[in-house]
């Protein structure tokens, strides 16, 4: 009852998008308490194998009692959810972003810092729109692996392509992985994927950087770490603001870019929508947009669209590039 009263008081705190916090924020108090309780002696009991796909654990935490679960269900029904999804980024908006980036590339011929910023912005558009990557996957794009397989990819005997390589931990996988996602050199709408990727590699090489994450921030000294999604939003919002100011017909002035747009989902949602509009086969979309397979897998890890070894990706490149080619 004490935790129930605390959670009700928490539900009255001011929210970001509504007058008060939403249920998903309020319920974290229950998770915090139960996680602490499970560290105490006697907090958990025996563990039993349920059906081969997971386990069932006995717990003595009051937050898992029948009464408390009914209380949380009642709170959710009465509070509801205010869902504000990221705004879809359209193909027209993406193409106008590239027009501005091309102008910047020609303008900053002697400024490597500006050129790097320009190519990084183009890279997040490539990964998020042409590759259909989630926002949290973009910082995992690996520079050294792309350089390693660049010549082999662009000189492919039948299907020249661009090797997009990601390194790190991924959803529903264990440990560090290296994934390969071949992209078309140029899409049907005119997105110059190979050109911008080559410019990025050359700019980094001129700066003396040949390995590590593509999107990076330098901490104290020379330590380098991967950028956060918030860091990428700064680049994304910057180019979209310029598109809005220059072409209000393409991106209406009433759109609040800072609040409605993010690399977390805007580019991926726009990519999926454009693929549907262009009639790209469902199987090709699902091979690239891996969430559909996970939702239907019922706890069993399905086959991923990205290949773990470049040899596998190279053998299937003709099929894998259909998505980025068709956009």
Image (cartoon, helix red, strand yellow):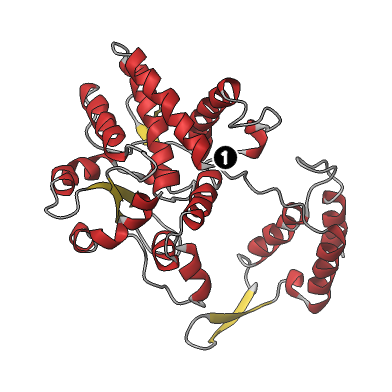
Across and down, in percent, residue 15 comes to: 79, 42
Query: Could you classify mark 1 by the number of other residues whose Cα lies within 10 Å: few (under 14), some (14-19), or many (20 or more)?
Result: many
Drawn side of residue 47 relative to residue 193, left or right:
right
Q: Residue 315's quadrant in the figure?
A: bottom left
Closer to us: 139 or 261 = 261
Q: Is residue 308 visible?
A: no
Drawn side of residue 306 relative to residue 129, left or right:
left
Drawn side of residue 129 relative to residue 156, left or right:
right
Drawn side of residue 4 relative to residue 91, left or right:
right
Q: Secondary structure at mark 1?
A: loop
Closer to us: 13 or 247 = 247
What residue is drawn where x is 82% and y is 56%?
7
What residue is drawn where x is 35% and y is 32%?
224
Above or below residue 287? Residue 153 is above
Across and down, in percent, residue 29 comes to: 74, 56
Across and down, in percent, residue 26 comes to: 77, 54
Residue that numbered label 1 is attached to: 262
Image quarter (top left, top right, bottom left or bottom right) of the N terminus: bottom right
Above or below residue 258? Residue 22 is below
Across and down, in percent, residue 325 comes to: 34, 50
Q: Residue 213's quadrant in the figure?
A: top left
Closer to us: 132 or 220 = 132
């Amino acid at each position: 009852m004490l935790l129930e009263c605390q959670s009700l008081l928490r539900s009255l705190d001011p929210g970001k998008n509504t007058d008060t916090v939403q249920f998903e924020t309020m319920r974290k108090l229950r998770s915090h308490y139960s996680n602490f309780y499970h560290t105490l002696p006697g907090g958990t009991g025996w563990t039993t194998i349920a059906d081969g796909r997971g386990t069932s654990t006995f717990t003595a935490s009051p937050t898992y009692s029948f009464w408390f679960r009914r209380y949380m269900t009642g709170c959710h029904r009465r509070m509801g959810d205010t869902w504000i999804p990221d705004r879809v980024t359209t193909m027209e908006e993406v193409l106008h972003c590239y027009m501005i980036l091309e102008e910047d590339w020609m303008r900053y011929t002697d400024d490597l810092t500006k050129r790097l910023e320009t190519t990084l912005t183009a890279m997040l558009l490539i990964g998020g729109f042409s590759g259909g990557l989630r926002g949290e996957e973009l910082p995992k794009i690996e520079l050294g692996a792309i350089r390693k397989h660049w010549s082999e990819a662009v000189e492919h005997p039948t299907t020249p392509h661009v090797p997009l390589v990601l390194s790190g931990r991924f959803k529903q996988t264990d440990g560090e992985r290296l994934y390969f996602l071949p992209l078309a050199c140029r899409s049907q709408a005119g997105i110059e994927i190979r050109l911008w990727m080559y410019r990025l590699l050359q700019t980094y090489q001129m700066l003396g950087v040949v390995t590590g994450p593509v999107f990076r921030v330098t901490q104290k000294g020379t330590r380098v770490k991967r950028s956060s999604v918030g860091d990428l939003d700064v680049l994304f919002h910057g180019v979209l603001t310029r598109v809005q100011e220059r072409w209000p017909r393409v991106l209406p002035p009433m759109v609040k870019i800072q609040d409605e747009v993010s690399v977390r989902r805007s580019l991926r949602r726009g990519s999926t929508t454009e693929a549907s509009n262009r009639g790209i086969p469902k199987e090709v979309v699902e091979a690239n947009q891996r969430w559909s397979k996970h939702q239907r897998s019922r706890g069993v890890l399905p086959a991923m669209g990205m290949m773990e070894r470049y040899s596998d990706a190279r053998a299937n490149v003709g099929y894998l590039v259909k998505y980025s080619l068709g956009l």
